Amino acid sequence: MQTEDVAGIQGVAQEVGIALKGEAYAINVAVKYPDPAAAILDYGLMKATQTATKSITLVNTGKYAVAFAFHQRGAMMKELFSITPAEGNLAPGAQQPVELAFNRSGHHALQANKITRTSSCPHILLTHACAKQHLMCVKVAFAH
């Protein structure tokens, strides 16, 4: 650090070294799927009017609390999937079960059939602190 007069006329009057220490840390949130071998939520073969719920678990393996939020792209995804809780905070070492319910109301047969034609694997986006994102693939197969 350098000190000098306000006008800067006399130049540097004193110079002192300052040691700064800081900590950089990674945001470590793990997503545990029902099948650890596959990073996908597979609802299996269903009729379009059926409902089903799958769960994942968020685990904060880091040293600091983190916030999380799920974002669904498109109105159709928002209608077909309900997520509980959709957002929250995770303390260090904490786990948070999250339910992803497909077609909870059972009234979205037309939209459900449309989503399989337009997207081979619809996605739900999980965002946590520092805007780090995790794309979750959701698979639903429909019986005719």
Image: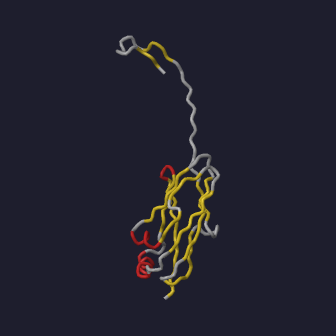
Q: Quadrant of residue 56?
A: bottom right
Of residue 28 and residue 72, the one placed in the foreground of this image is: 72
Q: Residue furthest top?
A: 10
Q: Residue furthest bottom?
A: 144
Q: Taking 79 as reference, is 90 above or below it?
A: above
On screen, residue 116 versus residue 46, left or right, reads left
Of residue 81 and residue 31, the one placed in the foreground of this image is: 81
Of residue 6 and residue 65, the one placed in the foreground of this image is: 65
Q: Quadrant of residue 110?
A: bottom left
On screen, residue 96 versus residue 82, left or right, reads right
Q: Residue at x 50, y 83 (%)?
A: 142
Q: Residue at x 48, y 62 (%)?
A: 125
Residue 27's x, y, as percent? 56, 50
Residue 130's x, y, as percent? 49, 49
Of residue 5 and residue 52, the one placed in the foreground of this image is: 52
Report the number of discs: 0
Residue 58's x, y, as percent? 59, 59
Q: Residue at x 56, y 71 (%)?
A: 41
Residue 97's x, y, as percent? 60, 62
Which colour assignment does the render follow? secondary structure
